[in-house]
Image (cartoon, rainbow, N blue to C red):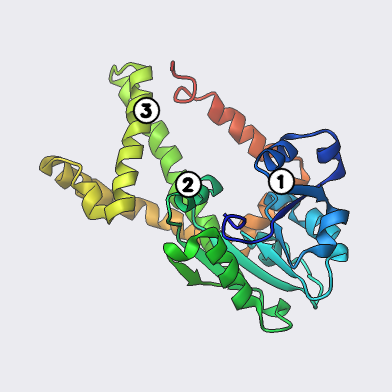
Amino acid sequence: NMRDSGLDISYALRKEAIAEKRASWRKATENGFKVGTYEELIPQADLVVNLTPDKQHSDVVRTVQPLMKDGAALGYSHGFNIVEVGEQIRKDITVVMVAPKCPGTEVREEYKRGFGVPTLIAVHPENDPKGEGMAIAKAWAAATGGHRAGVLESSFVAEVKSDLMGEQTILCGMLQAGSLLCFDKLVEEGTDPAYAEKLIQFGWETITEALKQGGITLMMDRLSNPAKLRAYALSEQLKEIMAPLFQKHMDDIISGEFSSGMMADWANDDKKLLTWREETGKTAFETAPQ
């Protein structure tokens, strides 16, 4: 998107990725980008955008900082490294964030159709030596197409805390629990597992698309009137049950307790994460016939 908006974009990869022609190198070169090593490209860059996984941020940032020219800018799409890890950035470097509120694949697809996705922007106040951070963030967001959908000024702290809560509890946490519970109940009542799985998968897709386009009102309009009444009553029960759970999780995020636990798992080779992933992969929902 940034290249198609007129910016000069290059991909900095590790020497090994280039020498071994790994997937990252293949994708970049196949799409016509200039690719080089950190040592070749970082010293020339006005803006260095760190789009690596959170777990790798510290190693990457500590590697590229000495290579960045004086007065350059460092960009993030998620502020965990700054807020939770407490990464210290060289004082002459401007630190900004542009955080589209959807996966990168959708950012690209929306751009290609002439639109964009809602995007948060922020400047790290301790790293804005020339007062140019907000202008850089706005320009970067516009280059991704975000301005066509809406760009909201945020902060590193607000983005991190809301992103953690949204992804874990509201989005994936709710969908995972709902999918497994509904599937198990359907199968228990005699529904074919393959049918039950597809019913849930495509049901979520239809309902969430309506929610995206027109809020709860449009989503509920996809239901019959009796179903609407029952859904409302059930939602009231669920809110009462789940509100304390949501509040506890949010408290853990705000206090940093959640992040401390996650970083401890990083240091333990992601043992908890991999165990949970393996357990989920063995559920009846995941192993249902296709």
Question: Whole-percent x and y of residue 233?
Answer: 20, 48
Residue of label 2 = 109
At a point 17% along the width and 45% down the height, the residue shown is 228
**In the picture provided, is 56 more to the left or to the right than 136?**
right
At a point 38% along the width and 57% down the height, the residue shown is 243
Residue of label 1 = 265
- Amino acid at pointer 3: Phe
Residue of label 3 = 183
Residue 96 shows in the view: yes
Instruction: Decide: is 1 above or below 184.
Output: below
Residue sitting at the far left: 225
**In the picture provided, is 236 more to the left or to the right than 290?**
left
Of badges 3 and 2, the one in the foreground is 2
Question: Mark 1 Cα within 10 Å, few/some/many (few <14, many 20+)?
Answer: some
Q: CA distance from mark 2 to mark 1?
A: 34 Å
At a point 65% along the width and 60% down the height, the residue shown is 80
**In the picture provided, is 20 more to the left or to the right than 85?**
right
- Amino acid at pointer 2: Glu
